[in-house]
Amino acid sequence: MLRYLPATSTLLSRCVASLTRTFHPRIRRSLSGMADRVVAVRCVAGEPKLTISFVLDGSHRHMLRDQSEKLGKVLLRIANNAAKGGGGQGGRAKKSKKSKAASQSAEPVVVVQLLHDGEPVSEEADNGEAWRDGATLRVGETSYEVRRNEPSFVRAQLHGGPLAGFPVFPRLEVEFGRLEDCEFTWYREATASPAGETPTQEVEWVLAGSGRIYVPSNLDIGSRLKVLATPRDGERSGSPKELVSVATVEAGPGWCTCDNRHAYTAREAGPGRLRVLSYNILADVYAQTELSRTVLYPYCPPYALQLDYRFNLLLKELAGYRADLLCLQEVDTGVFADSLAPALDAYGLDGTFRVKERQHEGLATFYRRSRLRLLSRHDIMLSEALTSDPLHSDLLERVSANPVLKDKILHMSTTLQVSVFEDVNEPSKKLCVGNTHLYWHPKGGNIRLVQMGVAMQHLSHVIKQEAPGAAFIFCGDFNSTPDSGVCQLVQGGMVPDSHPDWVSGGPEESCSMELLSPLPPLLSACGDPAYTNYVGGFHGVLDYVFLQPDGLEVDQVIPLPSHEEVTSHQALPSVAHPSDHIALVCDLRFRP
């Protein structure tokens, strides 16, 4: 009968993985033991070693061996281990000193074989060839199914600090599989744990939901969550992994400033349309400063400035807009890799990131992979491009007339993300997207003008060389009000040498010049909003979505929260909003 175990182990493991975990813990342990008759072999071409992992006499064994080593040496090692553990019969019998001495000099008494199609594999075969998928390892009377390079999670964590009504997701990295194929089953504790206490008995779990993203309800408040994640690659599945939240689910803030806006984005944009978002999400490196806590956001409770809390709000807001293209600013390096990228991947979005030199935050551009295909990237640091790219030689010469201004500009790490896409369904439709975050200081209008001059020249060059005739979108936090020289350059195509922004930094930084845009005038896709940045001492427009009107037209602008909605929470960021900026969201339509 044991010879049928290898064929049924896969079925057993799937059955165990799909159980609701409402069984008695002793029964669960018994079922799990039946699924342990598997040998997981990781063997990758180009790597000198392979790993062999399995459970022997209740202990997990992990063997690291050379791929070129002969199979017989590994089988002998397994036989020795099995003999020490009781012959593979599941017990570790006590031995007398005499029997121990005898066992050390004797040959292993446990027969170990590797079988393929019922026939023993030659012990002279190399490990890399011998350990095949579907083979059988026989240790005494126990048989194991060999699974070579089965799908597995090399990284698995569960997002901390869950809130009722806000998405929760596991951070995962899968090997030999695809995240989109993986299966997820969610559970909550049958009885909520007392606040701050760790359960002293085995927890009973109740089925709560399925899918890679789970949104806790009020029923989950006070309970921990658990997700059973099964790695898969098509029909192939690996060993499931259980992840349990450290914290219990807490009540959310209730109404959020994005809730009313989500009523306009309940569905994705239709065919031929593109939903675009631009959003400065407030980098954690800035939210945690003393300036932020005492001057910029003194009205904001300290817990609401913490990254875990703000990310809960941010993910709910971004997911609810169902955007096809997201241009984000002030994205922490760690937040992109550990949180944003895996979370938005679960919503069907891929992302690219460009960090600012000498800083820990930068720009991120996400795009819906069912709608857009990334063709190329052309990111630059503006100060570096100004001095190294001949495109900007004329501008560099004029800036060099003021060494103080030039030195200040060259020490800045402001970056520009440029991405070229094609429409997945209509590859003839190309799209060039710019994303930037210009210098922040209120008296830095002259610096922002030079930065925008470099950006526009680079964007024009990319469109001509990489995507002639492509539609064009330019998003970002420009730190510039609508009457600024930057907006005049983008929307009007020219800034005269008399514009007051040229002397905004004082006489020592003055560098007046006429600045021309190499691109046709762009249109503000979101019109003239009342504000996109709202803090205690300021509210106004600093963020923009610009488009080239001969390739795109506006189909819908998602209304911003009203003044009353914002002030009901004093100002942004607040308990119900993750940033001091407000997301700009609009639906665009490709022109024929």
Image (cartoon, rainbow, N blue to C red):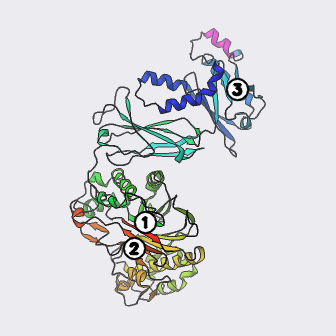
Pointer 2: what residue? 525
Earlier along the polypeptide chain: callout 2 or callout 3?
Answer: 3
Which residue is depicted at the point 38% across and 64% down?
Answer: 280
Q: Which amino acid, by three-letter code, is at mark 3? A: Leu
Point out residue 57 in the picture as x, y percentages from the top left corner: 57, 21
Q: Which amino acid, by three-letter code, is at mark 1? A: Val
Point out residue 526 in the picture as x, y percentages from the top left corner: 36, 72
Q: CA distance from mark 1 to mark 2?
A: 10 Å
100 within the magenta span: yes
Give the answer, above or below, for where 389 lies relative to 428.
Answer: below
Q: Are marks 1 and 2 in contact (CB under 8 Å)?
A: yes
Residue numbers of the magenta segment: 95-104
Could you tell me which quadrant the N terminus lies in?
A: top right
Q: Secondary structure at mark 1?
A: strand
Q: CA distance from mark 3 to mark 1?
A: 59 Å
Q: Which numbered disc covers residue 147?
A: none
Mark 3: few/some/many CA within 10 Å (<14, 14-19, 20+): some
Earlier along the polypeptide chain: callout 1 or callout 2?
Answer: 1
Residue in front for this viewpoint, 298 or 181: 181
Q: Are marks 3 and 1 in contact (CB under 8 Å)?
A: no
Pointer 3: what residue? 75
255 within the magenta span: no
Which residue is depicted at the point 53% across and 86% down?
Answer: 394
Which residue is depicted at the point 42% across and 83% down?
Answer: 489
Residue in front for this viewpoint, 526 or 335: 526
Q: Secondary structure at mark 3?
A: helix
Pointer 1: what residue? 276
Picture mark count:
3
